[in-house]
Image: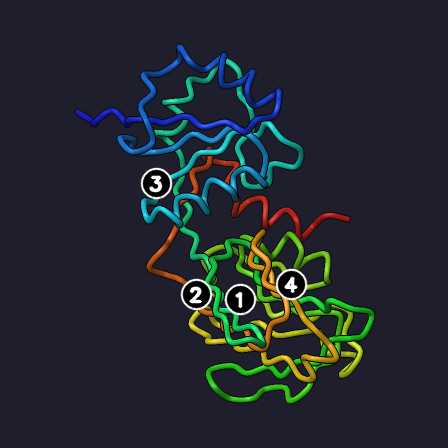
Amino acid sequence: MTKELRLALVASDSGPAQEAASALLGEADWVSPDKADALVVLGGDGFMLHVLHSMLDLDRVLPVFGVNRGTVGFLMNRVRPGKPLAERVAKARHIAVSPLEMTATTNSGEQFVYNAINEVSLLRETRQAAKLEVRVNGKVRMAELACDGVLLSTPVGSTAYNLSANGPILPLGCHMLALTPISPFRPRRWKGAILPESADVTFRVLESDKRPVAAVADQKEVRDIAEVRIIAARKHQLTLLFDRGSSLEERIFAEQFQV
């Protein structure tokens, strides 16, 4: 006999999410997150990222089944009236996601360590272009990149900011990362690179006093940086749950054929 999953329910503060939470209260024997086997999240992509980051901060990671009560809902499942939620979670497909770990060092020597599920981006703080040195696995691959910024994206984040910056879409399970420049000035035609997930990437800010740069790991920002190092945080692997036939993998695939 299969053990029944213990589910916890969390919802964003939005009206649609709160209404959905009230409607679901009698559908399952909900437990608190610390006693749950899986987490049901009601809201949009932003709230889903917030919940995932909260679990990483607490170092207690549960499989997460999102239900879209937001706008885009790329990381969420559709609302399906009449389909028991506990049954959907039990039958869901598991997608493993490795976040990035960013270590940002400021010009004053302070260090900040944050995780990113979508991407780590470096962005100029003033009207002047940023100048960056790009190292991969300790070797300088680009001595000077003049640009508005640059980002390193996971497959999950490859359809977000990365795609808007003309970066490549990465299929889940490819164990690759997208290194994408944002409005590059020199070298002007550089389109970026696809790196293995095992890559150790470091950006060093050149002329940081004159050309200050901020680093952003999803929603966490560090300003006035001197250097940023990024690695895949495989020990903090996350698990997203999707209805079969409508997984995140299928959505990433479909994005490549949109016109």
In the depicted view, which residue is nearer to us: 193 or 249? 193
Location of mark 1 (residue): 177
Element carrying mark 1 = strand
Observer-side mark, 4 or 1, equals: 1
Q: Residue 210, position in %: x, y?
A: 74, 80
**Residue 231, picture quadrant:** bottom left
Q: Residues within 10 Å of mark 4 (few under 14, many from 20)?
A: many
Question: Which mark, residue 232?
Answer: 2
Please report whichever mark, 4 or 1, sits nearer to the chain's N-terminal start: 4
Residue shown at 53%/78% (left/top)? 202
Location of mark 3 (residue): 62
Location of mark 4 (residue): 168
Q: Amino acid at mark 2?
A: Ala
In the depicted view, which residue is nearer to us: 195 or 14? 14
Q: Amino acid at mark 3?
A: Leu
Observer-side mark, 4 or 3, equals: 3
Q: CA distance from mark 2 to mark 1?
A: 9 Å
Residue shown at 39%/42% (left/top)? 94
Determine contact: label 3, label 1, CB under 8 Å. Answer: no
Q: CA distance from mark 2 to mark 4?
A: 18 Å
* Horizontal side, residue 83 vs residue 2: left or right: right
Please report whichever mark, 2 or 3, sits nearer to the chain's N-terminal start: 3
Element carrying mark 4 = loop
Residue shown at 39%/13% (left/top)? 27
Q: Residues within 10 Å of mark 3 (few under 14, many from 20)?
A: some
Element carrying mark 2 = strand
How many callouts does the rendering have?
4
Determine contact: label 2, label 1, CB under 8 Å. Answer: yes
Q: CA distance from mark 2 to mark 3?
A: 19 Å
In the rendered image, the quadrant that contains the N terminus is top left
Q: Residue furthest left?
A: 1
